[in-house]
Amino acid sequence: MSISKMWKSKMNTKYAVIGTIIVTAVTVLVFVAPQTSSPIIMVPSTGWVSETEREYKNLLFHFSLIYPKDLQVREYDDGTSASTITFEDRAGKNGFQIFIVPYPEKQVSVEQFKKDVPSGVMENPINIKIDGAPATLFYSRDVIVGDTLEVWFIKNGFLYEVTTSKELESWLADIMKTWQFF
């Protein structure tokens, strides 16, 4: 075999090996390497109820509510078993959020409360009902929002935590009256 043929053969083998390494590396990066988990943000479709109101329906958690049409609704899925749904006006002044997490207990434990409310503040708790489900309404504090109004309840194996700023108490109360499970 001539030197030029040997050299070409080695070069072809070298390129084949390099090509195999590249394909393997890309495969590992795409299919095996840990994926970064960034939240998936979804904008759900909603239906009109009147000129000023829309209906939000969540088929996964089997509930609906009626909210002011000027609020934008977003659903956040961060790849865990928890979900967050936000309702907020464009200015960011009026809004509320619903945090939902699987919860097998009948009552909220102290541990769960401390986990979800780092301030540990629960002032003036009042027992109410949300479409027949026992709920607790209370005031709390959040480092970002400030003084908050919260409504927590458990239904069908899920803990629902509805939060807004304290000043929006009566506004949120009107919205929560429309909450229905189906």
Image (cartoon, rainbow, N blue to C red):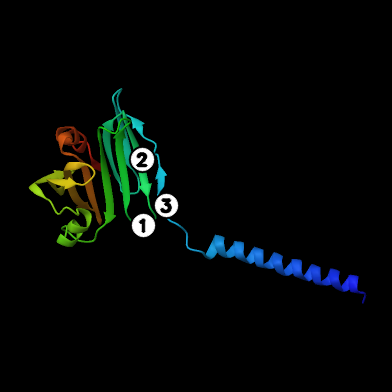
Residue 18 placed where, x, y %? 70, 67
The three-letter code of the residue at mark 2 reads: Arg
Residue 129 sits in which quadrant?
Answer: top left
- Cα distance in 3D space between marks 1 and 2: 17 Å
Q: Earlier in the sequence, mark 1 or mark 3?
A: 3
Residue at the (15%, 60%) spot, across then down:
110
The residue identified by callout 2 is 74
Q: Earlier in the sequence, mark 2 or mark 3?
A: 3
The residue identified by callout 1 is 80
Q: Which mark is residue 38?
A: 3
The three-letter code of the residue at mark 3 reads: Ser
Residue at the (21%, 35%) spot, across then down:
175
Of 93 and 157, which appears nearest the observer? 93
Of 107 and 23, which appears nearest the observer? 23
* Helix, strand or loop status at disc 2: strand
Residue at the (32%, 37%) spot, across then down:
56
- Cα distance in 3D space between marks 2 and 3: 15 Å
* Helix, strand or loop status at disc 3: loop
